[in-house]
Amino acid sequence: MVAEASSDTLKTLEASLLNTSGTVPLHNRFRALFTLKSLKSDDAVQIISRGFEDDSALLKHELAYCLGQMKNTSALPVLESVLSNESEDPMVRHEAAEAMGAISSTTSIAVLKKYINDPERSVRETCEIALDKIQWDNSEEGQKFRKILESEDRSYTSIDPAPPSSRLLTGKPAPEDFSETTISQLRSSLLDNKLPLFERYRAMFALRDIGTPAAVDALSAGFSDDSALFKHEIAFVFGQLLSAHSVPSLLVVLQNTNESDMVRHEAAEALGGIATPEVLPHLKEWMNREDAPRVVRESCQVAIDMWEYENSDQFQYADGLELSSAPVPLAA
């Protein structure tokens, strides 16, 4: 179902997302973005696409993510352009490739294959996973999974880079899936760097769907991997799970100055979503530290807004439609 918005609302959301006044805080721009994402319309795609002129890699990364989640093929040209721009931040290019995998059009295969040997590891690994996902989506199992998604309510509504392992495709783990044996087997697949990344991701999302403390511990073990892409996806999964059990490992990642920026940024946002009391001082520290990379500082700013939302009585985070009645200054 596509939400509707008036032309005035769209103009207000565009002004907020693109910060035409120069005074819109980053976290409010994120709220406008996620409101546009919920609309899923061609107009929303066009507005989001204009944001790639911004100088914030974090924002552009999030733009690409939202375009993928909207699953609107009208976003493919701009996503292909972002992936093809080798001067763009690798974190943004990777997200564009992942978004193409989420939209899962066979027309994206050629451009994804073109960059499967990209010098940037996170880009080439994402292209590999996206190609495997498109192939799987068009397989017999993938077609059955699509029907499951259309017919059932699921705990996680995101379009993930890979589906859960076959036995957990329904999204509702059976009693035996919570067993030590099953979790151990999935952990082994998760950590086996001889397996294709797509298969390791399938184990990752299966562990997410199980969601127990033991599953969280298995996922945390993945932070020892040498792939920043892989580790950033684990942090993202923790942001979906919202398990307080993952907070210690996420704090270690955030505070590790030797860790990749893209992993630390995802850890910060996960902590903001989990929103337990002990995480707030750490988010404030890294938002204000002058030696922190920009993407980490900005992620902490957004995470603090998420933390405040989770600890408030606000109805929803993507509240741009409600806020659109409040005037946002437009550029002359």
Image (spheres, rainbow, N blue to C red):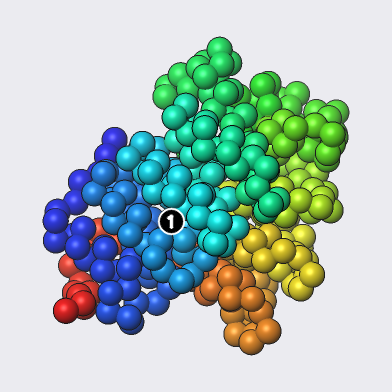
Relative image position of residue 20 (x, y in whole percent): 28, 74
Q: Position of 37 compared to 295: left or right?
A: left
Relative image position of residue 205 (x, y in whole percent): 65, 37
Examine the rendered structure and indicate whether residue 25 appears above or below residue 153: below
Relative image position of residue 29 (x, y in whole percent): 38, 68
Relative image position of residue 221 (x, y in whole percent): 83, 49
Locate the N terminus and report the quarter of the image it occupies.
top left
| Helix, strand or loop status at disc 1 | helix
Query: Residue drawn 72% across and 54% down?
Result: 228
Residue 47 occupies which quadrant of the picture?
bottom left
Q: Position of 262 compared to 146: left or right?
A: right
Taking depth in this image into account, of 277 and 32 the one nearest to the observer is 32
Locate the C terminus and report the quarter of the image it occupies.
bottom left
Give the amino acid at mark 1: Leu
Examine the rendered structure and indicate whether residue 300 appears above or below residue 271: below
Residue on which disc 1 sits: 63
Judge the density around disc 1: few (<14), some (14-19), many (≥20) Cα neighbours within 10 Å: many
Q: Position of 85 compared to 221: left or right?
A: left
Q: Residue furthest top?
A: 140
| Residue 184 appears in view | yes
Q: Residue furthest left?
A: 7
Query: Residue drawn 68% across and 33% down?
Result: 198
Query: Residue drawn 55% across and 62% down?
Result: 87
| Residue 170 appears in view | no
- Total residue callouts: 1
Examine the rendered structure and indicate whether residue 162 appears above or below residue 126: above
Q: Position of 207 compared to 103: left or right?
A: right
Examine the rendered structure and indicate whether residue 109 appears above or below residue 256: above
Query: Residue drawn 52% across and 66% down?
Result: 57
Residue 182 occupies which quadrant of the picture?
top right
